[in-house]
Amino acid sequence: MTMVVDRSDEDARRVIRESIDETVIVEAAAGTGKTTELVNRILAVIREGRAEVREIVAVTFTEKAAGELKLRLRQGLEVERRKAHDSAVIHRLEQAVAKLEEAHVSTIHGFCADLLRERPVEARVDPLFKVLTEGQAERLFGEAFADWFQSQLENPPEGVRRSLRRPSRAFRAGDADEDGPVERLRAAAYRLAEWRDFRGEGHR
């Protein structure tokens, strides 16, 4: 059963914490406590024996957020362990603390990379592949684009010619031209690279 929560704040938080046998979709703005309630829900799942920590998957968008989530989960487990009186609950919490590193708490990219490394043959990827950071990816793309662009200047195709003929939008001499012809071409190439898995005439 899937529950879409549209209730008062406290009622919604109670549902997130306590309705652990149901799938709950939560939509909330930044800074409203989603991570806190996610941690509370994970703690309840472990405390009630619905799953072991290694069976839990929690993904975020950034490494910083994933690190914070794992830290808060560890702190929460320690607090719950000190509060618990039932021996079975204490055992579950102690096991969760001991095996916390087996939990899949990471970025979306990190989680997908783990799946690919488990099934490299089926995925047709090198099992020794690495996931670049955003900065590394941008630098690598910049180098590849610069090499490609230089190779096109001697006899540029019509699409490159059209881009280079378009006027610049810089207002004064010396201003950084973020919408100059080369930057527009670079931005278009970067967007194209983001969709590189979709084969077609325009993706060569």
Image: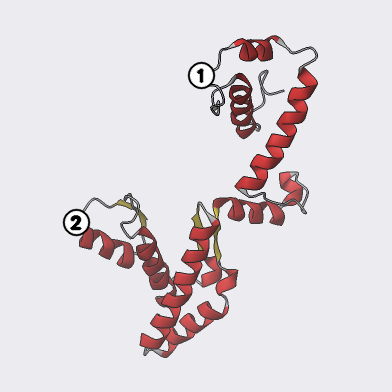
Looking at the image, which residue is at 61% across and 19% down?
181
Q: Which element carries disc 1, helix, strand or loop?
A: loop
- Separation (CA) of disc 2 from disc 1: 49 Å
Q: Which amino acid does label 2 sit on?
A: Ser
Pinpoint residue 68: horizontal percent, then vertical percent: 48, 65
Q: In the rendering, which numbered label is found on residue 8?
A: 2
Q: Which residue lies furthest to the front in this view?
A: 173
Q: Within the image, what quadrant is residue 14 found in?
A: bottom left
Residue 2's mark? none
Q: In this view, does 8 lie above or below 177?
A: below
Q: Is mark 2 on a helix, strand or loop?
A: loop
Location of residue 12 in the rendering, given as x and y in whole percent from the top left corner: 25, 59
Quarter of the image with the C terminus in it: top right
Quadrant of residue 77 within the rendered picture: bottom left
The picture places residue 144, in percent across and down from the top left corner, at 74, 33
* Residue to which mark 1 is pinned: 169
Amino acid identity at mark 1? Arg
x and y, in percent, of residue 119 in the image: 71, 53
Judge whether residue 1 can be spotted in this image. Answer: no
Q: Which colour scheme is used?
A: secondary structure
Residue in front for this viewpoint, 48 or 146:
146
The 10 Å Cα crowd at callout 1, few under 14, some 14 to 19, many 20 or more, is few
Q: In this view, does 76 lie to the left or right of 111?
A: left
- What residue appears at the point 62 percent right and 31 percent down from the top-left corner? 190
Is residue 15 left or right of 130 when viewed as pictured?
Answer: left
Q: Nearer the viewer, mark 2 or mark 1?
A: 1
Which of these two is toward me, 37 or 93? 37
Give me the residue at 62% from left, 14% from top: 163
Q: Note whether residue 113 is visible.
A: yes
Query: In terms of sequence position, does the residue under pointer 2 or pointer 1 come before the other?
Result: 2
